[in-house]
Amino acid sequence: MPALASRPALRDLRALRTAPLLSSGQREHLRSQLQGAMASCSWFTLGLMAPSTEAALACLRQLEMAQGWPALQAVGTAWGPGPVFLKGNQNSGQLVIRNEEGLGEGLLISGHCPGDPSVEDTWGPFPLDFFG
């Protein structure tokens, strides 16, 4: 895994397949940048790659608490043990989880702003405990 600068930019994460290990200073620096970028968006979608359903939901709930978002509701129960991909959509208020092998691990956040598409972007992958 490539090393990140001591003060990484959000764009430094783009090429990564899995979330990097981050120091507390790097986390704080990235969180500050992310909050600024997210402030211009109206709503968000999430992509979460995790080793289990439990890990994916724990990451999601930490993010929701940190951002003060209402909890997304699961649609369907078509997942089993093993690695999962969780897709969440604030606009619909729903999430789906599916088993998927061969993924990295981490959280991707996409910001949406119909009134100003120039601020829309996808950020991450962030470690599963980024908001913990």
Image (cartoon, rainbow, N blue to C red):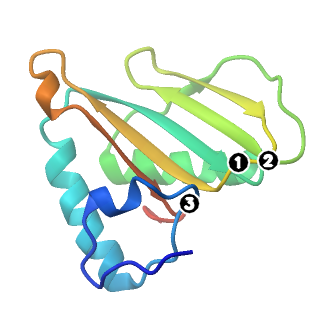
Query: Where is residue 71 drawn, in percent x and y?
Result: 48, 33
Residue plotted at (28% across, 59% down): 10
Which label lies toward us, 1 or 3?
A: 1
Which of the labelled discs sits on residue 112, or is there none? none
Residue 130: x percent and y percent?
A: 45, 64
Mark 1 and mark 3 residues within 8 Å of each other at the beta carbon: no
The image position of residue 54, as x and y in percent, is: 73, 50
Give the labeled residue for mark 3. 128
Question: Which secondary structure lies at badge 2?
Answer: loop
The CA span between labels 2 and 3 is 13 Å
Q: Measuring from the top left, give residue 6's x and y in whole percent.
A: 29, 85
Query: What element does badge 3 sit on?
Result: loop
Q: Residue at x 24, y 79 (%)?
A: 7
Counting residues from the start of the chain, the first of labels 2 and 3 encountered is 2
- Give the mark toward the camera: 2 or 1: 1
Three-letter code for the amino acid on which mark 3 is drawn? Leu
Residue under label 1, please give it: 103
Which residue is identified by label 2? 83
In primary-sequence order, the first of circles 2 and 1 is 2
The front one of 129 and 104 is: 104
Does 29 sit left or right of 23 as displayed? left
Which residue is situated farthest in the right direction here? 81
**Tag 2: amino acid:** Pro
Secondary structure category for the residue under label 1:
loop
x 22%, y 31%: residue: 120
Closer to us: 87 or 63: 87
- Between 15 and 21, which is closer to the camera in this rendering? 15
What's under tag 1, amino acid-wise? Answer: Leu
